[in-house]
Image (cartoon, rainbow, N blue to C red):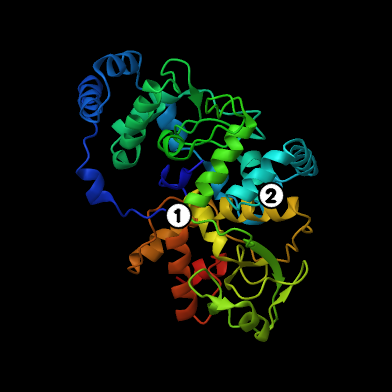
């Protein structure tokens, strides 16, 4: 679920936290590392019996590290990514689930203020409505990633949380499976999130995120509320942009009222925009592609997943499930992918920009650097890197 920290390849993840990670034990002989984890778990109040039983079967999993470094789908631009993930069948199944679990969604909207379309979209994207929840051994995955020295400060607490779940009878280190990054269940929650936000939605006395849709959905709703979701407010809406527009005003850094944007020529495409809220105009593929306004709730999505493309697509899909029409793709300029994107990042870095790593992913840092260079070169400042920009650098 909260994959915002799970890979340096995820867009928007900067390499802040390096100093932090250096202070967290990692690497070295795996057996010694596990021994250190056991000592820390004991210091956190777990019993010797629990700790010994949890770690007795833990093994390092090379496949987890391979999966961590291989996420090519996030290199796709928004239009292609959304078309890959959103289909009529997925929309129809989402609406069928909305009806099937209508009383559950009513409770979520009443208790947590999260719209059913938002959770349905995450449920669809994370596990295809529970059909595939991952087959990696969760304990092995978490310990492997905690041992890996790229982000130990992010995964070590998840290991300790998993030990606590085990002690509570909610986790089996030998049998619990999920995603390569340690997420569990229908909406893919990490152990620490389960401890903090797990809800027994079906009233059977257990929090069963793998087998109970009410538990998973209620837990997801509670977590979004905890992250700051504002009840009854929208999150994203498609708009039409005027031809003559100051494109440098677009992006999450600029917030204006709906009325101010409309005075600048921004028009809704799916009915009236909610007034009285500060919103930003987003151009996921530049000023010739689709355009949206993002409300405050949109920012909560980044606590679920820091990939801008994923967030845009999940938020858009939620609006589709609520009746919005297919976006107008426009005619965006060709973007950069793979080696060309890495070349761009290398040149931007050479000019003194922090691009968050040469990874071939159009993340927040790369977009920010692109906007600076577009302004310097007299190009449309929309954050969309093109071959024309690359040629000018």
Which residue corresponds to the image point at 20% horizontal and 29% vertical from the top-left? 43
Rendered location of residue 59, percent (x, y): 35, 18
Element type where label 2 sits in the image: helix
Specify whether 143 is left or right of 74.
left
Which residue corresponds to the image point at 22% horizontal and 50% vertical from the top-left? 19
Residue under label 2: 117
Residue 151 higher or lower than 58, as above or below: below
Q: Residues within 10 Å of mark 2 (few under 14, many from 20)?
A: many
Front position among marks 1 and 2: 2
Q: Quadrant of the C terminus?
A: bottom left
Element type where label 1 sits in the image: helix
Residue 86 higher or lower than 32, as above or below: below
Which residue corresponds to the image point at 67% horizontal and 34% vertical from the top-left? 129
> Which is more toward the observer, 234 or 386?
234
- Asked if labels 2 and 1 touch by Cβ distance under 8 angstroms, the answer is no
Residue under label 1: 342
Residue 356 higher or lower than 267, as above or below: above
Rendered location of residue 20, percent (x, y): 24, 48
Quadrant in the rendering for residue 381: bottom right
Rendered location of residue 63, percent (x, y): 44, 26
Is there any visible trace of residue 237 in the rendered image?
Answer: yes
> Which is more toward the observer, 351 or 47?
47
Q: Residues within 10 Å of mark 1 (few under 14, many from 20)?
A: some
């Amino acid at each position: 679920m909260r994959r915002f920290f799970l890979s340096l390849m995820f867009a928007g993840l900067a390499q802040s936290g390096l100093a932090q990670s250096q202070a967290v034990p990692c690497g070295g002989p795996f057996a010694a590392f596990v021994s250190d984890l056991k000592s820390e778990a004991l210091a956190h109040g777990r019993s010797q019996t629990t700790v010994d039983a949890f770690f007795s079967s833990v093994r390092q999993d090379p496949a987890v590290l391979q999966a961590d470094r291989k996420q090519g789908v996030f290199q796709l631009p928004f239009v292609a990514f959304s078309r890959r993930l959103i289909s009529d069948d997925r929309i129809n199944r989402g609406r069928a689930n909305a009806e099937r679990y209508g009383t559950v969604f009513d409770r979520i909207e009443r208790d947590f203020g999260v719209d059913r379309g938002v959770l349905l979209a995450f449920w669809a994207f994370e596990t295809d409505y529970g059909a595939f929840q991952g087959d990696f051994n969760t304990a092995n995955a978490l310990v492997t990633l905690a041992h890996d020295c790229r982000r130990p400060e992010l995964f070590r607490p998840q290991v300790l949380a998993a030990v606590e779940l085990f002690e509570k009878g909610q986790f089996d280190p030998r049998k619990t499976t999920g995603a390569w990054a340690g997420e569990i269940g229908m909406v893919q929650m990490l152990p620490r999130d389960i401890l903090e936000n797990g809800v027994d939605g079906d009233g059977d006395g257990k929090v069963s995120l793998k087998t109970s849709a009410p538990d998973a959905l209620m837990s997801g709703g509670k977590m979004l509320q905890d992250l700051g979701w504002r009840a009854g407010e929208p999150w994203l809406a498609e708009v039409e942009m005027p031809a003559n527009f100051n494109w440098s005003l677009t992006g999450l850094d600029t917030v204006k009222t709906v009325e101010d944007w409309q005075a600048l020529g921004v028009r809704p495409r799916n009915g009236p925009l909610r007034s009285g809220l500060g919103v930003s105009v987003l151009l996921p593929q530049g000023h010739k592609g689709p355009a949206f306004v993002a409300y405050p709730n949109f920012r909560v999505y980044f606590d679920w997943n820091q990939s801008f493309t994923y967030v845009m697509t999940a938020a858009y899909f939620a609006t589709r499930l609520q009746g919005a029409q297919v976006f107008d793709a426009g005619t965006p300029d060709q973007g950069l992918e793979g080696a060309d994107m890495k070349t761009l990042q290398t040149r931007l870095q050479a000019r003194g920009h922090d691009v968050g790593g040469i990874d071939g992913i159009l993340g927040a840092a790369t977009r920010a650097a692109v906007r600076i260079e577009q302004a310097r070169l007299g190009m449309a400042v929309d954050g969309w890197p093109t071959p024309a920009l690359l040629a000018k650098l």
